[in-house]
Amino acid sequence: MSFPLDIGLGTIIATVGLLLLWSISTAARRHRSMVAQIRGPPSPSWVVGHEQSFRNQDQVGDLEFQWVREYGAAFRLKGVFGEDALMVVGSTVHA
């Protein structure tokens, strides 16, 4: 008994599209998980993250200096809608 192999072009395109979507989402999750493992200050809001804190500080850099003392030269911040952001601070500027 033999079964005919009748795969249309639409099926092939859909399969390739799903594989591409899966690989992109896997790479995005892997990237997010690496940044999420880094310590950082708790987010005051899921919607605006630390953006509001930056706008309400008395002097520019006050929060950053505090966080560097507490978390070190690399720490995680939250952006808009809970997106992770990595802050890396260097002690010197190279020209």
Image (cartoon, helix red, strand yellow):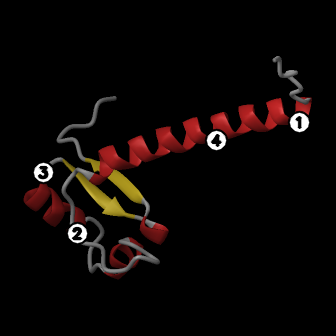
Question: Quick one: 60 or 73, which is closer to the camera?
Answer: 73
Tell me what residue is drawn at x 27 percent, y 74 percent: 59
- How many marks do you count on the picture? 4
Question: On the picture, is 9 further left or further right than 55?
Answer: right
Tell me what residue is drawn at x 38 percent, y 55 percent: 85
Question: On the picture, is 23 further left or further right than 69?
Answer: right
Q: CA distance from mark 1 to mark 4?
A: 16 Å
Dot 2 amino acid type: Leu
Dot placed on the residue nearer the N-terminal end, 1 or 4: 1
Where is residue 3 shown, x and y percent of the image?
83, 22
Q: CA distance from mark 2 to mark 1?
A: 54 Å
Dot 3 amino acid type: Gly
Tell me what residue is drawn at x 12 percent, y 51 percent: 72
Question: Quick one: 57 or 5, which is closer to the camera?
Answer: 5
Q: Which residue is mark 1?
A: 10
Q: Looking at the image, do the residues carrying marks 3 and 2 touch, with CB atoms under 8 Å apart?
A: no
Dot placed on the residue nearer the N-terminal end, 3 or 2: 2
Q: Looking at the image, do the residues carrying marks 1 and 3 touch, with CB atoms under 8 Å apart?
A: no
Q: CA distance from mark 4 to mark 3?
A: 36 Å
Q: CA distance from mark 3 to mark 2?
A: 13 Å
Q: Which residue is mark 2?
A: 63
Q: Give the number of the mark in front: 2 or 1.
A: 1
- Label ID, residue 49: none
Dot 4 amino acid type: Leu
Q: Give the number of the mark in front: 1 or 3.
A: 1
Q: Which residue is mark 4?
A: 21
Dot placed on the residue nearer the N-terminal end, 4 or 2: 4
Dot placed on the residue nearer the N-terminal end, 4 or 3: 4
Tell me what residue is drawn at x 39 percent, y 49 percent: 32
Q: Which residue is mark 3?
A: 72
Where is residue 21 shown, x and y percent of the image?
64, 41
Where is residue 69 shown, x and y percent of the image?
9, 58
